[in-house]
Amino acid sequence: MKLLKPLIFSLICLVGLQAPVDSHGAESRQKQSSGKTTKAKAAKAKATKASKARPVKARQVKTVKPLRQRKMAQAVAASQAPNAAHLAALRSSAVVIIDPKTQDVLYQKNQNTVMPIASLTKLMTALVVLDANQSMTQQLTVTSADVDRLKYSTSRLQVGTKLSRTSMLHLALMSSENRAASALGRNYPGGTRAFVAAMNRKARALGMRNTRYVEPTGLSSANVSTPSDLAKLVIAAEKSALIRRYSTDHQFSIRQGRSTSVYHNTNRLTASSNWRIRLQKTGYISEAGRCMVLYTMVNNRPTVMVFLNSQGKYSHAADANRARSWLAGYRTGKVKRRH
């Protein structure tokens, strides 16, 4: 019994000492728990207040089309609307596209602007030569008078070469041979001065009111016209089978002394299977830029195209391709007329 009393006393002391520690720990845990709860409630209240003050829009999720579907959509768009871009990319300063059957102007840009026309002049030269009814087999001689002393351009047609009038006309239209055109004008009844006068009379007769010629080659920048006037010239010239043939031939050979000279067409579009060209003429001097006229078929419809002052060696041909692409869409009803 004496031994039990000290043992019981020791147990009571141990229990008394641990009780305050446990109650303190419980109280501490309770305070921590209540602190966390208070903070959570405060954060929730703050979020609720913010959501009421500034509503949050629902995020829109963009749907992404499958790759094949996107490619098909792009292809359809490209097939339906390349045309406006084609016309916007034209590099010619003045353009007109006409339906010669109806005289409708399908597209125009500065169609009445007067500017140099370079070797487009030779179409009028050809008309005046044919109107004179001179012998086409008559031999004409290239002389020093036919040498270019205005631009000092070169020529493969040698002084002293003799060719028939028809061969001179062939070279002038197909290869834009300046000495050939000069010889044609010089051998007109009354000479070059009378020839130029006949050119201007013919222009007036065709209704080309803003056109003026001073010589038969186009080397002078004083030979001027407008796209609208030149369209009238093209329509008139296309009626001549000889002009159609000579202007669209791919090549022509002549004899000069003991050698043969092979000439080619200045217009590369005549060799393209994508084009059906009935008549064409190109021209270039620095003042006129690149120039070209065409009488062609687009969607089996006759079309006259005139391009003046295009910058870049092949820019006039590129413009013609763009215009043809646009016109093909226009005539199938896919695009509207542009003015």
Image (cartoon, rainbow, N blue to C red):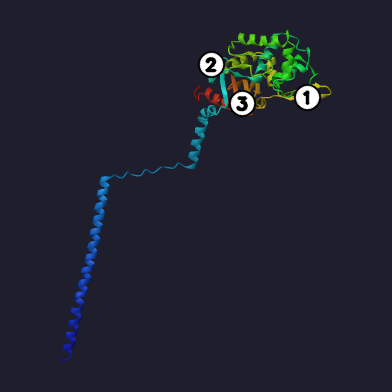
Quarter of the image for the N terminus: give it.
Answer: bottom left
- Front position among marks 3 and 2: 3
Q: Position of residue 31 (x, y in %)?
A: 22, 65
Give the mark nearest the N terminus, 3 or 2: 2
Q: Which mark is residue 261?
A: 1
- Front position among marks 2 and 1: 1
Taking depth in this image into account, of 296 and 111 the one nearest to the observer is 111
Above or below residue 83? Residue 22 is below
Separation of residues labelled 3 and 1 (CA atoms): 27 Å
Within the image, what quadrant is residue 195 found in?
top right
Amino acid type, label 3: His
Amino acid type, label 1: Ser
Q: Residues within 10 Å of mark 3 (few under 14, many from 20)?
A: many
Separation of residues labelled 3 and 2 (CA atoms): 22 Å
Q: Is residue 119 left or right of residue 44?
A: right
Q: Position of residue 158 (x, y in %)?
A: 78, 21
Residue holding disc 2: 104
Residue holding disc 3: 316
Q: Is residue 11 left or right of residue 273?
A: left
